[in-house]
Image (cartoon, rainbow, N blue to C red):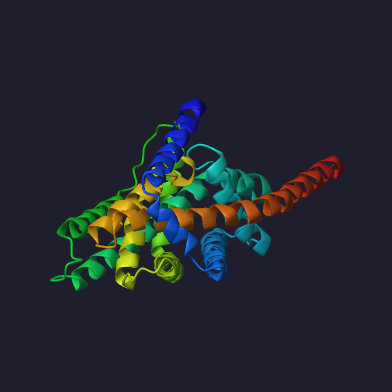
């Protein structure tokens, strides 16, 4: 599986490289970007990590676990880095393992947290996408295909979130974890205050993502409306469900390119903008990820030593 994984990485990188080689004019747009633009892009990338960390902090608090800033922000950075290093969202596995060994946080609760995160995020994304596309009705940027996609996504999310909890006498471990995840998700849905906070964070994340594309397009000298940048980000967000390459390398870029082509921003420019955003996010992940990996490793070692000491002193 690992060989296949890195083979797909090679295919994605080679495909992007060959495309840029046959479109050398795109490189000129990158060279025209003002150096000072890198700073706000980096800060936006850090802000995305911060929002993802706050998701974790709020969820964890719901289950009685108070995380320090170096944990909730650090785990977001480590997760982002880990997703580029290991197959199929390995960063999330590392996050779940840390919470389990450091705070005795059950994997079932982590699954509930992850499921709720996706359901809330895609509900908000779908609704904003539908509203944004309807406001473009009658213009050259309107696309009924995009509107139908968002409608189908919203219906799918509603169906998934209303999936009933099933009681059974079976003791299969995987089934029990899924059952616990559904029960935990039901608890989260009943907490209106928690839902309000999570929706607000999702809106903030979407705003940052749209600004990312908007700033990059503007830095390349392109006049792309904010609504178009927003829709490109919303459509590319769904690629998180297709974890076949590190951080969806190639997949997310392809989605952004197709979305930009449909919405009138230009497929080439959509690909280039997505690649620039990719470069910034990788830089951020591999700048902060190693730092917090060391800090959180020390936390685990210290907690293990305390646990062993308590065990020896116990009667």
- In percent of width and height, residue 67 lies at 64, 61
Residue 162, above or below 124: above
The foreground one among 169 and 253 is: 253
Q: Is residue 309 left or right of residue 173?
A: right
Based on the displayed image, in which of its 4 quarters is residue 118 positioned? bottom left
Q: At x 47% / y 57%, what residue is drawn?
A: 276
- Which quadrant, please, contains the C terminus? top right
**133 vs 112, nearest the viewer:** 133
Q: Residue at x 37, y 53 (%)?
A: 271
Q: Is residue 117 shown to the viewer in this render?
A: no
Can you say whether 301 is above or below 222 in the image? above
* In front of the other: 100 or 248: 248
Q: Is residue 297 above or below residue 135?
A: above
Residue found farthest to the left? 138
**Quadrant location of residue 274?**
bottom left
Residue 167 x %, y %: 36, 41
User: Residue 121 location, x and y as percent?
Assistant: 38, 60
Instruction: Judge whether residue 168 can be spotted in this image.
Output: yes
Q: Residue at x 46, y 59 (%)?
A: 30
- Point out residue 304 in the picture as x, y percentages from the top left corner: 76, 44
Identify which residue, 159 or 53, lies in the foreground.
Answer: 53
């Amino acid at each position: 599986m690992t060989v296949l994984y890195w083979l797909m990485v090679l295919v994605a990188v080679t495909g992007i490289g060959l495309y840029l080689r046959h479109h050398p004019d795109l490189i000129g747009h990158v060279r025209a970007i003002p150096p000072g633009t890198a700073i706000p892009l980096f800060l936006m990338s850090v802000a995305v990590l911060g929002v993802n960390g706050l998701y974790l902090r709020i969820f964890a608090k719901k289950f009685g676990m108070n995380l320090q800033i170096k944990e909730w922000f650090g785990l977001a950075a480590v997760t982002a880095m880990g997703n580029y290093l290991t197959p199929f969202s390995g960063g999330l596995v590392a996050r779940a393992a840390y919470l389990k060994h450091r705070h005795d946080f059950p994997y079932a609760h982590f699954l509930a947290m992850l499921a709720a995160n996706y359901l809330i995020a895609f509900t908000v994304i779908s609704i904003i996408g539908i509203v944004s596309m309807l406001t473009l009705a009658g213009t050259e940027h309107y696309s009924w295909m995009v509107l139908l996609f968002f409608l189908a996504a919203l219906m799918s999310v509603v169906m998934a979130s209303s999936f009933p909890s099933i009681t059974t006498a079976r003791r299969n471990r995987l089934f029990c974890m899924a059952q616990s995840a559904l029960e935990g998700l039901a608890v989260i849905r009943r907490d209106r205050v928690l839902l309000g906070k999570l929706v607000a964070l999702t809106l903030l994340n979407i705003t940052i993502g749209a600004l990312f594309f908007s700033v990059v397009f503007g830095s390349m000298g392109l006049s792309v409306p904010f609504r178009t940048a927003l829709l490109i980000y919303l459509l590319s967000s769904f690629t998180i469900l297709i974890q076949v390459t590190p951080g969806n390398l190639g997949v997310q870029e392809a989605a952004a390119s197709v979305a930009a082509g449909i919405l009138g921003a230009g497929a080439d420019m959509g690909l280039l903008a997505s690649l620039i955003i990719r470069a910034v996010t990788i830089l951020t992940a591999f700048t902060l990820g190693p730092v917090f990996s060391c800090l959180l490793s020390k936390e685990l070692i210290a907690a293990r030593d305390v646990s062993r000491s308590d065990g020896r002193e116990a009667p």
